[in-house]
């Protein structure tokens, strides 16, 4: 089946999605990395993130590919590993901007649906269950309190960023606002998504809840 896990930044989507895919023996796709890759490419070309014509041309020339290495999943752009370059606070905010542009969403919609064609995959993102895979067999929306999410992100960025905890939280609130109020594919739970709040749950507890729902979906009589 196709499993989608949507939710805001810092909710634990990446950790949970990877672990769930491993438990199921599925592939894992971090769709947020694809938007970050577009933002990174736009920044390198000094391109405005609201220039739709330029973004459309940029996307036509992109060659993005996920590969698995000893250090985990890596994202290549034209054969160059950009994984570590797309995780900065600047690229994070730029990605929120480009993700609202129709040209970027149209391009990545095709990329993502092609990745899901063979099933057996867990997609992590923000509109996987609402837009990209509205017919996915299993949908989750993972959330958590803003303070919890900001603290998680701060701990993740400690080694690569000088941002203070309050700056991380302010950035996250701004991104939440941008993502949830945009006209195109806003961040909202799918009508048929299972909503899980991870504020007071461990990763294992979240995964066990998800597996229980998946098993019930596969075998309704269990």
Image (cartoon, helix red, strand yellow):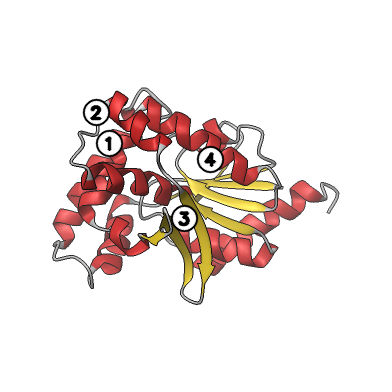
Q: Dividing the image into 4 quarters, which one contains the C terminus?
A: bottom right
* Residue drawn at 42 percent across, 47 percent down: 34
- The alpha-carbon separation of the residues under discs 4 and 2 comes to 21 Å
In this rendering, the label closer to the viewer, 3 or 1: 1
**Whether residue 184 is visible:** yes
Which sits in the foreground, 185 or 203? Answer: 185
- In the picture, the disc for residue 126 is none
Mark 4 and mark 1: span between their CA atoms?
A: 19 Å
Give the Cα separation between the discs numbered 2 and 1. 8 Å
Q: Nearer the viewer, mark 4 or mark 1?
A: 4
x, y percentage for residue 172? 25, 48
Give the numbered dot on residue 50. 2
Along the horizontal axis of the image, is 168 left or right of 78? Answer: left
Frontmost residue, 187 versus 131: 131
Asked if the residue under mark 1 is in contact with the one under mark 2, i.e. CB atoms within 8 Å, the reply is: yes
Cα separation, mark 3 vs mark 2, equals: 27 Å
């Amino acid at each position: 089946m196709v499993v989608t896990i949507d939710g805001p930044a810092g909710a634990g989507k990446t950790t949970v999605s990877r672990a769930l895919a491993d438990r199921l023996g599925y592939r894992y796709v971090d769709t947020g990395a694809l938007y970050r890759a577009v933002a990174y490419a736009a920044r390198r070309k000094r391109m405005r993130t609201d220039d739709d014509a330029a973004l459309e041309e940029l996307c036509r020339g992109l060659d993005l590919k996920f590969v698995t290495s000893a250090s985990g999943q890596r994202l290549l752009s034209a054969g160059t590993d950009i994984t570590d370059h797309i995780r900065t606070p600047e690229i994070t905010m730029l990605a929120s901007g480009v993700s609202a542009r129709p040209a970027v969403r149209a391009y990545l919609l095709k990329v993502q649906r092609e990745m899901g064609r063979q099933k057996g995959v867990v997609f992590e993102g923000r509109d996987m269950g609402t837009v990209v895979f509205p017919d996915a067999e299993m949908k989750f929306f993972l959330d958590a309190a803003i303070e919890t999410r900001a603290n998680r992100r701060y701990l993740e960025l400690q080694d690569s960023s000088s941002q203070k905890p309050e700056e991380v939280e302010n950035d996250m609130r701004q991104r939440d606002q941008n993502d949830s109020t945009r006209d195109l594919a806003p961040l909202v739970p799918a009508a048929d998504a299972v909503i899980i709040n991870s504020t007071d749950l461990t990763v294992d507890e979240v995964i066990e809840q998800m597996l229980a729902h998946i098993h019930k979906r596969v075998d309704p009589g269990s």
